[in-house]
């Protein structure tokens, strides 16, 4: 079974619609992240959370919001989707207990979002 | 923001050939990670490097953390068809937390049988 799961895997929506992407993990990690991937631009950080009560903006947070419902769940919302939010979205996790050695992020399979 | 320069951007090789790709930065990093991404999937961690000079292997893959802490390379020996994909380097800048992981733009590997 996958350690980091994302739902849905694919989504088509229309401009102006509100949508939510969900991420769950069974790795027991305390830190979770949302990234966006566009062709030729690599991965860019949208939001991150170091624990249930901690939410932080990343590099490109405008137009997005997040909710950390539990240690294992981190959801990303697009309040009013626009076409330039068409992209691949990835959730990732890491364990702060390994930060002294070197902290590694583990990724989910991704959600492909198309905004028409 | 900070960026990593990953090269080459793409490679077209014959099956059985060795592959080499690298990442460089203008600033010092204290962690280097190498990921592989298959079409329609998320990046999968291949090798993690935590010390300058560290050389680590994972099967046919070998990666090194540069002595200057500003670069890293990944080598793949005797390539096979399943090596096809996009390879990303990622680094954690010195003094930054885990949220500051910086990604390269990827190297797309294509293998001709």
Image (cartoon, coloured by chain):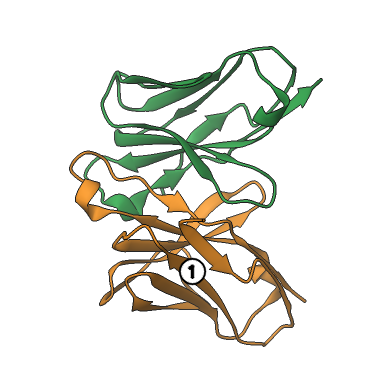
Chain colours: A orange, B green
- Dot 1 crowding, Cα within 10 Å, few <14, some 14–19, many 20+: many
Looking at this rendering, what residue extends furthest in the front direction?
A1
Q: Secondary structure at mark 1?
A: strand
User: Which is nearer the eye, B28 or B74?
Assistant: B74
- Residue at 48% of width from left, 65% of height from top? A60
- Residue at 29% of width from left, 45% of height from top? A103
The quadrant in which the C terminus of chain A is found is bottom right
Count numbered badges in the picture: 1
Q: Give the x, y percent position of residue B24.
A: 44, 28
Q: Give the x, y percent position of residue A17.
A: 66, 87
Q: Which residue is mark 1?
A: A23
- Residue at 40% of width from left, 62% of height from top? A26
Above or below, comparing residue B24 to residue A26 in the picture? above
Looking at this rendering, what residue extends furthest in the left direction?
A100
User: Which is nearer the eye, A3 or B52?
Assistant: A3
Above or below, comparing residue B61 to residue A82 in the picture? above
User: Which is nearer the eye, A20 or A45?
Assistant: A20
């Amino acid at each position: 079974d996958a350690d980091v799961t994302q739902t849905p895997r694919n989504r088509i929506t229309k401009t102006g619609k509100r949508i939510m992407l969900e991420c769950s993990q069974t790795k027991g990690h305390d830190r979770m992240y949302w990234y966006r991937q566009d062709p030729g631009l690599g991965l860019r950080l949208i939001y991150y959370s170091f624990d249930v009560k901690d939410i932080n903006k990343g590099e490109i947070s405008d137009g997005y919001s997040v909710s950390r419902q539990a240690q294992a769940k981190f959801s990303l919302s697009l309040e009013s989707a626009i076409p330039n939010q068409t992209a691949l979205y990835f959730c990732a996790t890491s364990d702060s207990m390994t930060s002294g050695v070197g902290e590694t992020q583990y990724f989910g399979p991704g959600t492909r979002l198309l905004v028409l | 923001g900070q960026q990593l320069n990953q090269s080459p951007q793409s490679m077209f090789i014959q099956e059985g050939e060795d592959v080499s790709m690298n990442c460089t930065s203008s600033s010092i990093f204290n962690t280097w990670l190498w990921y592989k991404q298959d079409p329609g999937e998320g990046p999968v961690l291949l090798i993690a490097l935590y010390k300058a000079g560290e050389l680590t292997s994972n099967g046919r893959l070998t990666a090194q953390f540069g002595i200057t802490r500003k670069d890293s390379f990944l080598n793949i020996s005797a390539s096979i068809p399943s090596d096809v994909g996009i390879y990303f380097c990622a680094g954690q800048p010195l003094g930054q937390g885990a949220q500051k992981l910086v990604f390269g733009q990827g190297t797309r590997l294509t293998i001709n049988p």
